Image (cartoon, coloured by chain):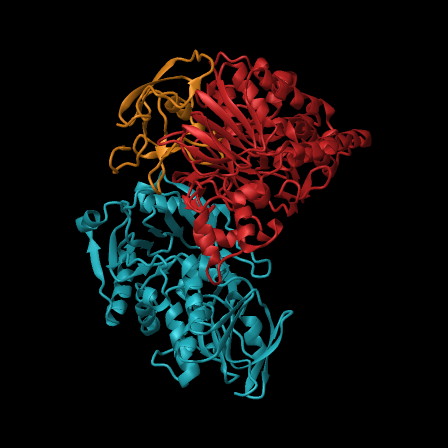
């Protein structure tokens, strides 16, 4: 995996603390700690630089409008469902993937 | 009893609901968000150590009052959060809640659908780390996050200064505020701006505070490109002959707001071109009537800001009541109309002062992405138009190139598309049309149709 | 033809009109095409994009096969691409009755030399694992194809223009009159021109011309409820159609899945509107989710329909006027005209230039409506309200 997509290097920065209960989700097979109340988008971008890959061209995307309008943050949930990351709250055990099922795993070199 | 459906639980929708409740009507209040307040006056997600009053600053009292009002009427409103209204069919709304389809029948429909950012694209604007200006504020209020470590606020909007101050006050590093409108253009709009001296004074104070905090504010500079390999590493600017790069890892981009008019379109509102906002806006009378039993309020009708949204919500509800056999006091109506007109006039002043940089949109380089959803470049649009029998109207350009055809239905690229098409066709901006609304207003899953709507 | 503006006027810049212009221009005729809006913006540009050979009316196969060969040659003919893909077409049956109907369609197609595979049981799942459990049997035709309707008509119009045809967009024809052995065509705000022959390819608006010459057809406007999904991984190569018409779907290589399905929906050629009732969209979504369950979590991103001309026997009007020499019709394609477009253009051009075409067009004569209208079973299946027919 490449720099900038590594866990721990987030695009977002917490401005204040969150007290919600810890919640575990998986992103690209990697466990990630979130808190109750986090949107999927915030949970992922607090630890990574990108959220998904664009369907046409494959470049990285991390959402844009952050309020459910631009539709640029749809991710794969549980290898099957599609959710808009900015308006969906994390729940325990969620499995999020950057790439569509049956495609090669993420490699951004 | 009159069945009233309100779409949107922001300032306009909540005020409208309150006015109807007062008249003894229990409206259905449908909102896509999980919590009331809309975009600007949103409720933070639970568990955040966020001092909302401090964050809202001068708006804190309004914010608190609106949420207090919502709490007071909550049990007299059929409030349905997390509900997307995806289509209008005669007197029925088609909705999606938690993956299930539903219908809401109404006698009168009041749309308070709010606004989203209007953005001029620039090369690199699809990189992770570039967000809308409204998004930069929304993620702070909703999730308690900054969009990056070093944030540049770029565009043409009075909210640039406000957002930068909000970030700065909570400890973020603000790399710069870049306002693409020259200072002279702002001065020229002063007569309209004087319609709301309080807001005008506040804007000037923001500027002073930012300067005092050592944050550079560049007027009249335009972004050449957002640079970086996998994410944002800087924004390259140009002012006259000078070009330079500001190092940053996030950019908030915003050039004013645009109403969310998709539902109004599906509900049959007529649209007219507004040369000041350079937008097609739904036509209403002074009270918000847009058609038989159709009322529009708030920024979803015309950009006016939160105060105008509240007043226009109350006013549209009063019009609705009057049209359904409950005459309203003339003095109240007159006062509300004056209030809405004054605040909207001020916004027109702002639209002049913080002008949409049409030339910048029209000059988007050929290889830059215009449509984020479909990955269509400005050059693809220009090449399609340059062919014999090439399209010269935005809906035809969409049909031929797929621009604006993706998940967002042209919400984001639509304004810049119109400028690019107008420039390429040699036509006036108003002559290239507007992207027609099509259901669904936002994406809906196939499983929604697997069970009958009820 | 001294004093004439050109040999042939074509009214209507849909697929039929532009291909007729193309073949006439290729035969050296001077052609002017008039289109009230942009070319290919009505049903030619918003249809499903099916180039289906399976399940057509038997008498149409000579025309259909001729047209198919032209589609296969689209790039060479026009110098442009239109996302033509020989995807194959999978016709699926939900039960034995439907399978028997498929067998009937298959025999008819085979009689015209089309290769049809009959697939059932395990073979069905092995070859097309994305098919839902409700699919009982299927027939597959490998030569069937799809193309992007938004691109095809403008491309053919440009090709016609390169051959010398004059394509006039944004010009409304307000009157067509007989004058001597030719025609006078009156244009809104653009004067009057004279021609030796006129082709009426005005789609859902075609009666306004035909009726000036004392002939008519029970034409009414309608459209298919369409939608398209967000892009999902490309797996479903053939277009898939259910015998009952509840699903007509195809995935494009970009990943979007395009869906049409019956019952069709009303459209308004006067206001130029073709709204889709949301209930029909929901019903279609349910059918698609059951037929192709892998898609059930994909999202619909756009809904549309079009303004197509329909006739109760579900056959188009193609060929010469029965009242007026030099007038030719091509309209009322009942939602299956896309595949026929280039063939209709070629055959009409022959009728105009040579007076005859090797492609039989008799079943499509406008004269057939003189003897009362037969309502097709297909019609009853595809519409909510047969009452929509004005007889």
Is residue C296 left or right of B304 when viewed as pictured?
Answer: left
Please name the color used to draw chain C.
cyan
Please name the color used to draw chain B.
red
Which residue is located at x 60 percent, y 42 percent? B264
Is residue B105 left or right of B82 when viewed as pictured?
Answer: right
In percent of width and height, residue C8 lies at: 50, 79
Q: Nearer the viewer, residue B8 or B338?
A: B338
Q: Write down the quadrant of residue C376 in the picture.
A: bottom left
Q: Nearer the viewer, residue B142 or B400?
A: B400
Which residue is located at x 55 percent, y 40 percent? B93
Q: Nearer the viewer, residue A109 or B304?
A: A109
In percent of width and height, residue B232 lies at: 41, 29
- Position of residue B91 relative to residue B329, above or below, is below
Chain displayed in orange: A
- Position of residue B453 relative to residue C53, above or below, is above
Residue farthest toward the right in the current orientation of the protein: B331
In percent of width and height, residue B382 lies at: 47, 52
In the rendered image, is residue B69 in sight? no
In percent of width and height, residue B415 lies at: 55, 43
């Amino acid at each position: 995996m490449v720099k900038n997509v590594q866990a721990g290097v987030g695009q977002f920065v917490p401005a204040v603390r969150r007290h919600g209960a810890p919640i575990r989700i998986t992103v690209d097979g990697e466990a990630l700690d979130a808190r109750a109340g986090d949107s999927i988008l915030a949970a992922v971008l607090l630890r990574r630089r990108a959220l998904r890959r664009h369907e046409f061209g494959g470049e990285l995307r991390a959402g844009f409008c952050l309020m459910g309008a631009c539709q640029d943050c749809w991710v794969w949930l549980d290898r099957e469902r599609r959710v808009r990351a900015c308006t969906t709250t994390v729940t325990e055990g969620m499995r999020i993937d950057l790439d569509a099922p049956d495609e090669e795993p993420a490699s951004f070199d | 009893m009159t069945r009233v459906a309100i779409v949107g639980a922001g300032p306009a929708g909540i005020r409208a609901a309150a006015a109807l409740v007062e008249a003894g009507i229990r409206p259905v209040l449908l909102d896509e968000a999980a919590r009331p307040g809309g975009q600007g006056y949103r409720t933070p997600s639970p568990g955040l150590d966020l001092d909302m009053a401090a964050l809202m600053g001068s708006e804190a009292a309004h914010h608190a009052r609106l949420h207090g009002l919502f709490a007071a009427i909550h049990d007299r409103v059929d409030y349905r959060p997390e509900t997307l209204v995806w289509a209008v069919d005669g007197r029925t709304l088609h909705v999606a809640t938690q993956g299930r389809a539903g219908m809401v029948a109404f006698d009168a429909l009041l749309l308070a659908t709010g606004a989203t950012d209007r953005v001029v694209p620039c090369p690199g604007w699809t990189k992770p780390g570039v967000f809308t200006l409204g998004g930069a504020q929304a993620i702070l209020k909703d999730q308690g996050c900054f969009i990056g470590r070093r944030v540049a606020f770029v565009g043409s909007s009075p909210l640039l200064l406000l957002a930068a101050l909000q970030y700065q006050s909570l400890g973020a590093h603000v790399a710069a505020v870049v306002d693409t409108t020259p200072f002279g253009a702002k001065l020229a709009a002063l007569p309209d701006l004087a319609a709301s001296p309080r807001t005008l004074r506040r804007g000037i104070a923001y500027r002073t505070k930012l300067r005092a905090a050592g944050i550079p504010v560049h007027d009249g500079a335009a972004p050449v490109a957002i640079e970086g390999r996998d994410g944002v590493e800087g924004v390259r600017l140009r002012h006259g002959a000078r070009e330079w790069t500001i190092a940053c890892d996030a950019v908030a981009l915003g050039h004013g707001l645009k109403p969310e008019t998709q539902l109004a379109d599906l509900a049959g509102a007529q649209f007219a071109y507004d040369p000041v906002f350079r937008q097609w806006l739904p036509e209403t009378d002074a009270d918000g009537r847009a058609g038989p039993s159709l009322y529009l309020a708030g920024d979803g009708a015309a950009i006016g800001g939160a105060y105008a949204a509240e007043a226009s919500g109350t006013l549209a509800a009063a019009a609705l009541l009057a049209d359904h056999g409950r005459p309203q006091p003339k003095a109240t109506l007159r006062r509300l109309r004056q209030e809405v007109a004054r605040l909207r006039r001020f916004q027109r002043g702002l639209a002049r002062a913080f002008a949409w940089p049409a030339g910048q949109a029209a000059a988007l380089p050929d290889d830059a992405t215009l449509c984020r959803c479909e990955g269509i470049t400005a050059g693809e649009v220009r090449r399609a138009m340059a062919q014999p029998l090439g399209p010269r109207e935005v809906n035809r350009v969409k049909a031929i190139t797929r621009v604006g055809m993706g998940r967002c239905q042209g919400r984001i690229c639509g304004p810049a598309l119109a400028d690019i098409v107008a420039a390429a066709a040699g036509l006036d901006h108003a002559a290239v049309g507007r992207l027609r609304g099509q259901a669904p207003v936002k994406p809906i899953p196939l499983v929604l149709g697997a069970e009958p709507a009820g | 033809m001294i004093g004439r503006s050109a040999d042939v006027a074509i009214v209507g810049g849909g697929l039929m009109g532009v291909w007729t212009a193309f073949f006439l221009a290729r035969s050296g005729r001077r052609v002017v095409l008039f289109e009230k809006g942009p070319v290919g913006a009505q049903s030619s540009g918003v249809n499903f994009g099916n180039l289906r050979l399976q399940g057509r009316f038997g008498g149409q196969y000579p025309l259909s096969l001729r047209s198919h060969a032209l589609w296969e040659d689209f790039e060479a003919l026009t110098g442009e691409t239109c996302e033509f893909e020989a995807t194959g077409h999978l016709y699926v049956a939900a039960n034995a009755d439907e399978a028997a109907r498929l067998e009937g369609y298959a025999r008819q197609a085979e009689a015209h030399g089309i290769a049809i595979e009959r697939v059932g049981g395990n073979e069905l799942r092995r070859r097309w694992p994305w098919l839902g459990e409700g699919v009982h049997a299927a027939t597959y035709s490998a030569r069937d194809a799809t193309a992007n309707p938004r691109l095809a008509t403008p491309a053919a119009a440009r090709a016609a223009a390169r051959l010398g045809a004059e394509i006039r967009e944004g010009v409304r024809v307000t009157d067509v009159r007989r004058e001597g052995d030719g025609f006078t065509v009156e244009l809104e705000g653009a004067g009057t021109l004279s021609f030796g022959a006129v082709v009426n390819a005005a789609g859902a608006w075609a009666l306004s011309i035909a009726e000036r010459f004392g002939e008519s057809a029970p034409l009414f406007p309608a459209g298919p409820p369409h939608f398209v999904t967000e892009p999902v991984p490309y797996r479903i190569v053939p277009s898939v159609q259910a015998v009952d018409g509840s699903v007509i779907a195809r995935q494009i290589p970009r990943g979007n899945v395009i869906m049409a399905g019956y019952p069709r929906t009303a459209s308004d050629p006067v206001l130029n509107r073709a709204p889709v009732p949301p209930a029909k969209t929901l019903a279609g979504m349910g059918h698609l989710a059951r037929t192709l369950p892998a898609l059930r979590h994909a999202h619909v991103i756009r809904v549309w329909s079009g303004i197509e001309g329909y006739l109760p026997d579900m056959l188009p009007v193609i060929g010469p006027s029965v009242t007026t020499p030099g007038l030719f019709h091509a309209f009322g394609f009942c939602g299956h005209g896309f595949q026929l477009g280039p063939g209709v253009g070629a055959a009409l051009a022959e009728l105009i230039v040579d007076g005859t075409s090797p492609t039989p067009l008799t079943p499509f004569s406008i004269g057939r409506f003189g003897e009362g209208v037969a309502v097709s079973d297909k019609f009853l299946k595809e519409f909510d309200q047969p009452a929509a027919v004005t007889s």
